[in-house]
Amino acid sequence: MRKLDNLERSWRVIQQNGRASKSESVRLDLERFAEDAPRNLRSLKGQLGCGSFQFEKAKGIPIPKLDGRGKPTGKIRPIVLAPVESRIVQRAILNVLVEIDALKPYVKTPYSFGGIRSARRRDKQSRHDEVSAVPAAIRAVLDEIGREARFIASADIRAFFTRISKEHVLGVIAGVIGDDAEFLSFLRSALTVELENLALLKDKAADFPTEEIGVAQGNSLSPLMGNIALAEFDRAMNEGDCRCIRYIDDFIIMAPSAKAATARLGKAVKLLAMLQMELSPEKSSKGGTPITDGFDFLGITICPGLIRPSIKAQNRFVESITKAFSESQMAMIGLKAGNPLEREKSLMATLRRVDGMIDGWGKHYWFCNDGQTFANVDQQIGQQIAGFLGCYRNVRAAVPISIHLPLLGLSQLATIERQPFTYPKKPEHA
């Protein structure tokens, strides 16, 4: 755990994950650490070596949960954001645990996906050889359909991470690694949640896992802890003629009949009750339904012959594009009133940002086969681009020519800082 190469690998993962964060504080924390990452990592190695490293208090972030129409439900997703140093060490611990042979069955199981990612491959051919996360879960669902599954039932485990018993998972790990009191104590510290903003959270504080039950959503170790906690659930749910494919707290039952799917869903309720867990009624099926009716799982719609992003996923993506253009248009229109234009809201910067969003969304759904869906989304985006360019032309026509370059997002020579030389004065006697 203390080896420098392990800490370096952990830092790269934390840095990569953080780049996509919408939180400015997360990005600033990463930038601070990256300013002298080699020295900071050596410092971490030294602290771990002499036993002086301590996990600092984290920040609780209550993310509002939305319903199918994008409206707040009044419930939250309790995300715990630890300082970057703590996150690096937590990831370093995970790197060690996943390499222990006796724990590998909890890391990679045939019916559990998500959370513990394998190394990504860059070439398209290898995507089909070694997939992970959502694509792997969807492929497993398709495999079961190919094996004559005809009915499904889907469900979501309510507040999953906050219901995991730390004592249980630590007991399993202790049984594997033996009597290593120092490491087990350190692992317990890595899983313990102390919040610096507990008072500010007020009534939402109770949703965060600050006691013996629950692990932090946002901790690199949480997915492995979840797999350990649900190991017996996964085994029992896949007995007989049904299959249960789980992605962290979402699962889908593939069955030969409606009766079998409904019975297996009832079994899930009983198994989860033994773990002090329960299903979310609003996100769970009441019984088996035919696969031929089509169904959604993990943001993917699967119906006979077609695999595509769900309507909800499409709408959410188009809304994010709309927001990017709207924010830029408002900033452009502000030029008419003499307001300055931030460069990231300029025409070219906005188009580059939208291009990145389109590219990222498309690559996320690389395994979907419904080309018409992507063409339809492209058409919606094209219409928005037309409106965006129309706004640009109107503003350009209404502002002085001196503002045309920053409106585009180009630099102005007149505003670039210079340190001009002074032309020598002619001697007085000349």
Image (cartoon, rainbow, N blue to C red):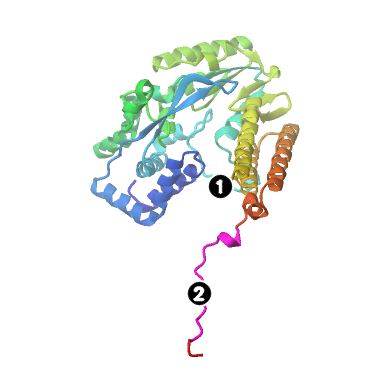
Q: Secondary structure at mark 2?
A: loop
- Per the image, is 426 magenta? yes
Observer-nearest of 333 and 117: 333
What residue is pinned by disc 2? 421
User: Looking at numbered disc 1 in the image, what kind of residue is underneath it?
Assistant: Glu
Alpha-carbon distance for marks 1 and 2?
Answer: 31 Å
Q: From what the image shows, is residue 279 above or below residue 229?
A: above
Indicate left or right for 47 with 368 as reference: left
Quadrant for residue 133, please give it.
top right
Circle 1 residue:
342
Disc 2 residue type (three-letter): Phe
Does 361 appear above or below 349? above
Q: Position of residue 230 (x, y in %)?
A: 44, 24
Q: Residue 401 appears at what percent x and percent y?
A: 67, 54
User: In this orientation, does residue 8 appear?
Assistant: no
83 with respect to 334 (left or right): left
Tell me if 88 is positioned left or right of 133 in this view: left
Which segment did they paint magenta?
412-427
Residue drawn at x 51%, y 71% as measured from the top left: 420
